[in-house]
Amino acid sequence: MKLLRKLPPEARLLLPAFVVILLVVAVPLLFSLYTSFTSYRLVRPETIWNVVWFKNYLKLFGNSDFWWAFGRTVLFLTVVLNLEMLFGLALALLVNQVTRGQRMLRTIMMFPMMFSPVLVGFQFKFMFNDNIGIVNHILQNWFGVTEAIPWLVESHLAFFSLACAEIWNSTAVFAILLLAGLMAMPQDPLEAARVDGCTPLQAFRHVTLPFLMPFVYIAMTIRSLDVGRAFDIVKIMTNGGPAGRTELIWTLSARAGYEDARMGYANAMSYVAVLLSIAFTVHFFRKLNASRQFLNEVDA
């Protein structure tokens, strides 16, 4: 109590928030980090005290299944982020040209991101179903395809289906942020470009796009953290199949932790995934700072 009285009033007001963050965030993180250095198994609680140091990590790095999942996660991140950026930019440019009903369009554009990833996973699972899916129905009835396409059974098609679901669910994040950038953009540089005889494509390439790049990297940073821990959609649509061909780090970690009960090993895998997300975040922050510096030099 004496220590609390010595604290300034502002610190005493913030103390409950710090306690909640400590209990909800810090303690579970420290516990999971500790268990990643143990042989902890869910079915044998006493193994939580069996410290094996870096044995889980060494075992992880020697596991080919983990490296395949790691590579697929990086590929999934790269493909999804870039396509979301392109589609989001196209949507933002189109909506920015609308003069009437733009507010309604912005609201409609945000609908997909309001759906739970679990619901999106079930929705696309049924859409890409071999027998009753609407995608195969349209292809067979409108485009003359004679055989049902195994979207969720063939490995490359399953990866494509997962990417479609993730892109549909989250392209709106890019679209909203880039639209905000377009609305905040000063019109003087564009008018100067038109006076100088620039075509619309040249004005977009040399004026609009450099101004939007900070918004692009902000969206990339946000979405890299989300896509890097993709689990719900993959679990619902393919469960890592066929034969583990769509297994990502987080689905492999969940399988090791809850199906095989190797929680210490699963937590080690999870921390490697966290480091991967941090690496993407640091990369995009560097790009963000570089784009801001470029804009400052141009303004100067």
Image (cartoon, rainbow, N blue to C red):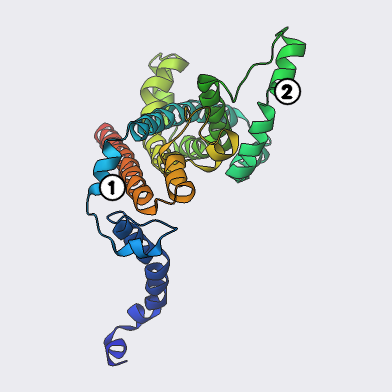
- Which secondary structure, mark 2? loop
Observer-nearest of 235 and 3: 235
Quadrant position of the C terminus in the picture: top left
Decide: is 156 above or below 171. Answer: above
Residue at the far left in the pictured view: 53
The answer to whether residue 279 shows anywhere in this view is yes
Q: Which residue is at 60% across, 44% downward? A: 118
Residue occupied by mark 1: 56
Residue at the far right in the pictured view: 141
The answer to whether residue 289 shows anywhere in this view is no
Relative image position of residue 135 (x, y in whole percent): 69, 21
Residue at the far bottom in the pictured view: 2
Q: Which residue is at 46% across, 46% downward? A: 254
Residue type (three-letter) at the residue carrying disc 1 = Asn
Q: Which mark's residue is nearer the viewer, 1 or 2?
A: 1
Q: Quadrant of residue 298?
A: top left
Observer-nearest of 85 and 298: 85
Q: Which residue is at 36% across, 81% downward? A: 12
Mark 1 or mark 2: whose residue is earlier in sequence: 1
Q: Which numbered disc covers residue 66?
A: none
Residue type (three-letter) at the residue carrying disc 2 = Asn
C-alpha gap between disc 1 and disc 2 = 43 Å
Mark 2, Cα crowd under 10 Å, few <14 / some 14-19 / many 20+, is some
Mark 1, Cα crowd under 10 Å, few <14 / some 14-19 / many 20+, is many
- Which secondary structure, mark 1? helix
Observer-nearest of 97 and 228: 228
Relative image position of residue 31 (x, y in whole percent): 34, 62
Count of numbered tags: 2
Observer-nearest of 85 and 40: 40
Residue occupied by mark 2: 131
